[in-house]
């Protein structure tokens, strides 16, 4: 049975946790919808759990977080070391949002707050042709971020991009590391709740536009399936 270890790097705001679940629970629902045979376990950094040896893991998924990868928390450097070891050992690994940025920073990229401000709601991303993972020309996914990968690592190929987020998904040359900025694990309800959470530090018209955009079709199941297959497919 395929087995994915989810590394929880942040907590859902307490006012939303009971209704929408934790980040690992969101990913578990996403993965189960794509492949019910996949088993998941969770290592919670906020819960004080220690990172395992990546050499003993089948696959790794790193969640989003309210933290920034440059914040200097004492758990950031060990997580970066964990990422480098997993990458070197070719353990299948995916990072989402904070996880996307953390993998990029750990492997030599640059992450910072974007001068474009907050991205939220439904964003449409262009897909690199012949990327080998995601079919089609574009994909629509909910996002919630201000930080971005500004300069990808040298061995990473950008396979999803938009004007707002030029490096929205990175596929690494080793073939076992993938990361994405937007959130295929989010429900529409949780993406809408996050827009509300930004009131007071994002313009009201931006929030209204983001919430209205969530009424349009989203490709979360499509990208969730890609992530699940990437983590569980057999490789030579």
Image (cartoon, helix red, strand yellow):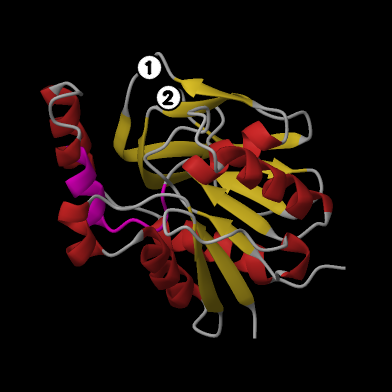
Q: Residue shown at 53%/45% (left/top)?
A: 99
Q: Which span is picked out in magenta?
A: 183-195
Q: Position of residue 13 (x, y in %)?
A: 24, 50
Q: Secondary structure at mark 2?
A: loop
Towards the viewer: 188 or 132: 188
Q: What's the mark number on residue 200?
A: none
Q: Quadrant of residue 220?
A: bottom left
Q: Nearer the viewer, mark 1 or mark 2?
A: 1
Q: Is residue 67 visible?
A: yes
Judge the density around disc 1: few (<14), some (14-19), many (≥20) Cα neighbours within 10 Å: few
Q: Position of residue 223 (x, y in %)?
A: 49, 57
Q: Secondary structure at mark 1?
A: loop
Specify whether 30 is left or right of 80: left
121 relative to 4, above or below:
above
Give the residue pinned by disc 2: 164
Q: Residue shown at 48%/41% (left/top)?
A: 98
Most common SS among magenta residues: helix
Judge the density around disc 2: few (<14), some (14-19), many (≥20) Cα neighbours within 10 Å: some
Tell me the quadrant of the picture where the N terminus can be found. bottom right
Q: Is residue 186 magenta?
A: yes
């Amino acid at each position: 049975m395929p087995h994915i270890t989810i590394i929880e790097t942040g907590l859902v705001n307490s006012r939303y946790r009971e209704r929408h679940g934790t980040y690992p629970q969101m990913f578990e629902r996403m993965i189960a919808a794509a492949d019910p045979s996949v088993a998941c376990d969770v290592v919670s950094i906020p819960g004080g759990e220690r990172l395992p040896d990546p050499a003993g893991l089948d696959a790794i998924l790193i969640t989003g977080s309210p933290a920034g990868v440059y914040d200097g928390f004492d758990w950031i450097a060990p997580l970066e070391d964990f990422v480098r070891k997993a990458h070197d050992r070719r353990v299948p690994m995916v990072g989402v949002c904070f996880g996307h940025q953390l993998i990029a920073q750990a492997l030599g990229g640059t992450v910072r707050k974007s001068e474009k401000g907050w991205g939220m709601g439904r964003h449409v991303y262009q897909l690199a042709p012949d990327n080998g993972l995601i079919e089609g020309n574009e994909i629509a996914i909910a996002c919630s971020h201000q930080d971005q990968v500004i300069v990808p690592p040298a061995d990473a190929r950008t396979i999803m991009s938009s004007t707002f987020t030029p490096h929205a998904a990175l596929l690494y040359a080793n073939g076992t590391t993938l990361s994405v900025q937007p959130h295929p694990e989010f429900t529409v309800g949780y993406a809408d709740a996050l827009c509300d959470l930004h009131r007071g530090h994002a313009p009201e018209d931006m929030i209204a536009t983001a919430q209205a955009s969530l009424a349009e079709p989203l490709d979360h199941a499509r990208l969730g399936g890609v992530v699940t297959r990437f983590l569980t497919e057999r490789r030579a």
